[in-house]
């Protein structure tokens, strides 16, 4: 345990934060694994399904930003209890859901709960372990893959269990009460430390200076897109940039600062990082389904294996971070992630398991070590810089990262199906072009695909498998960009005598 400005670290508080993150990812994992059954139970259209998935993303990021701005004023315990209350109410609403609107509402609320959890656990752990932030933030974020693995495991081992509920999906969501109630009971008797920034007497304005005009421009641009899309509209590029400029100018006038340039670089890299990790996770099930061995639940078991591997490695992050430093570990991780993605793009059958292992080794420390570096280099930024990084990552994934992957996938499928060997099939299933943020993209008519004969369906799946593998090569561009940024930061630290955490007193 580590001494902090508020005394000895409270390990019970740490484990409360850890289980809160487990609960967050457990709910997230169960919801992702159950959306197909909900679609059948509620007769949801693909559009309604997409809206529900979006409802689980935008409020998550927006609540992180909102609470980061006020958490030091209203108190960490109040925010933690608000998160627990949102989790409980959202699960009750989910169990009582009778159609699209009720489930959409519960999805919004659970996303708020998940984002609120993220907003308090990171600054609490960074404050409690102020002399070893990267190590303990890595251990804290072992809770994310742990919860995902548990959620996937329950769904795989109990595929048809209803217990005393009327549907399988109700039983699965009822299980989510277990980690939620557990972290709530752990939080109730705990006292939360005063944030390191507040304890050091750093003003609210000085906290905002770390983000500055440029940082708020980035946050404002993506936040505007998120809010507009949450309302069911498509945000224009001009309006989004205008909103970002307005917020950036206001922040610049108030703080008199453009922002810490090193923090801006971290902010620029977190979007590609989120897409590399979370975006790839979204494509992995389809790759395993189309290119993996013909084994029941193969994709689920690979997902559980990768999640357990990440959990164990993050628990033992301390010696690794000490050996390489946070920035050194980011350089190594980005290089391994590139290798893993290229490996995935060329893998079929059981080889996918080896490729997934390499990819997991690369992505394990990227997100959590970025948070550690942020906490260690910008203590003056308090909860805002630490949580702002997470929020921008999620917003980038939803606004640019995910649509970019989908856009490239659509064009790749168009190119492959336009080959002479497949033109007859393509003419039969080609859909109308669809507009998007990256321009018009070709589509496939899903209704016509359902009417294909077995040989035609097999032909299409063969093309889809090759196309989905190629997506990983496209995604590898993102960690390549990150690697260049990390190498630049590594050389900058080296020129200054090596990586050293910044003591808040130095400010």
Image: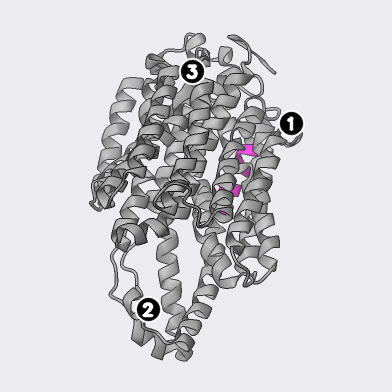
- Residue stretch in magenta: 480-491
State the residue position of label 3: 188
Residue count near mark 1 (Cα–Cα under 10 Å), binned few <14, some 14–19, many ≥20:
some
Residue drawn at x 45%, y 91% as measured from the top left: 420
Distance, label 1 to label 3, CA atoms, is 34 Å
State the residue position of label 1: 322
Along the line of sight, which residue is nearer the eye, 352 or 222? Answer: 352
Helix, strand, or loop for circle 2?
helix
Provide the major secondary structure of the magenta segment: helix
Residue farthest to the front? 164
- Residue 259 in percent (x, y) is at 43, 28
Is residue 270 shown to the viewer in this render? yes
- Mark 2 / mark 1, whichever is N-terminal: 1
Residue count near mark 2 (Cα–Cα under 10 Å), binned few <14, some 14–19, many ≥20:
few
State the residue position of label 2: 450
Is residue 271 shown to the viewer in this render? no
């Amino acid at each position: 345990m580590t001494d902090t400005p508020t005394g000895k670290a409270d390990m019970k508080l740490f484990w409360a934060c850890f289980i809160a993150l487990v609960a967050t990812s457990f709910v997230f994992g169960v919801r992702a694994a159950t959306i197909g059954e909900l679609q059948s139970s509620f007769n949801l259209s693909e559009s309604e399904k997409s809206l529900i998935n979006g409802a689980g993303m935008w409020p998550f990021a927006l609540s992180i930003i909102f609470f980061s701005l006020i958490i030091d004023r209203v108190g960490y315990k109040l925010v933690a209890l608000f998160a627990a209350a949102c989790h409980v109410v959202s699960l009750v609403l989910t169990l009582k859901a009778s159609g699209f609107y009720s489930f959409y509402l519960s999805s919004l609320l659970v996303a708020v709960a998940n984002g609120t959890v993220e907003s308090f656990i990171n600054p609490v752990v960074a404050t409690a372990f102020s002399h070893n932030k990267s190590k303990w933030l890595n251990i804290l974020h072992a809770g994310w893959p742990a919860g995902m693995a548990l959620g996937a495991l329950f769904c795989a081992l109990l595929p048809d269990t209803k217990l005393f509920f009327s549907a399988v999906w109700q039983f699965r969501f009822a299980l989510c009460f277990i980690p939620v109630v557990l972290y709530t009971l752990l939080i109730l008797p705990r006292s939360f430390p005063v944030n390191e920034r507040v304890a050091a007497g750093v003003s609210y304005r000085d906290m905002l200076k770390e983000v500055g005009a440029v940082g708020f421009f980035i946050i404002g641009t993506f936040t505007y897109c998120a809010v507009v899309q949450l309302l069911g509209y498509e945000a224009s590029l001009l309006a989004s940039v205008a909103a970002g400029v307005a917020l950036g100018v206001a922040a610049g006038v108030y703080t008199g600062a453009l922002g810490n340039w090193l923090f801006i670089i971290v902010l620029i890299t977190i979007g590609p990082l989120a897409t590399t990790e979370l975006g790839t996770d979204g494509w992995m099930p389809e790759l395993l389904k189309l290119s993996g061995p013909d084994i029941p639940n193969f994709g689920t078991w690979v997902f559980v294996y990768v999640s357990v591997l990440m959990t164990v490695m993050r628990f033992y992050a301390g010696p690794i971070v000490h050996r390489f430093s946070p920035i050194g570990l980011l350089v190594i991780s980005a290089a391994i992630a590139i290798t893993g993605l290229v490996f995935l793009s060329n893998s079929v059958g059981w080889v996918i398991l080896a490729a997934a292992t390499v990819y997991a080794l690369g992505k394990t420390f990227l997100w959590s070590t970025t948070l550690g570096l942020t906490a260690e280099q910008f203590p003056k930024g308090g909860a805002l810089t630490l949580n702002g990084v997470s929020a921008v990552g999620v917003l980038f994934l939803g606004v640019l990262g995910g649509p970019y992957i989908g856009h490239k996938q659509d064009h790749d499928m168009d190119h492959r199906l336009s080959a002479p060997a497949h033109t007859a099939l393509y003419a039969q299933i080609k859909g109308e072009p669809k507009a998007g943020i990256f321009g018009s993209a070709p589509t496939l008519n899903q209704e016509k695909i359902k009417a294909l004969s077995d040989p035609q369906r097999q032909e299409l799946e063969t093309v889809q498998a090759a196309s989905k593998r190629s997506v990983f090569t496209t995604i590898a561009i993102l960690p390549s960009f990150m690697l260049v940024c990390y190498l630049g930061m590594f050389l900058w630290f080296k020129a200054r005598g090596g990586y050293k955490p910044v003591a808040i007193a130095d400010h």
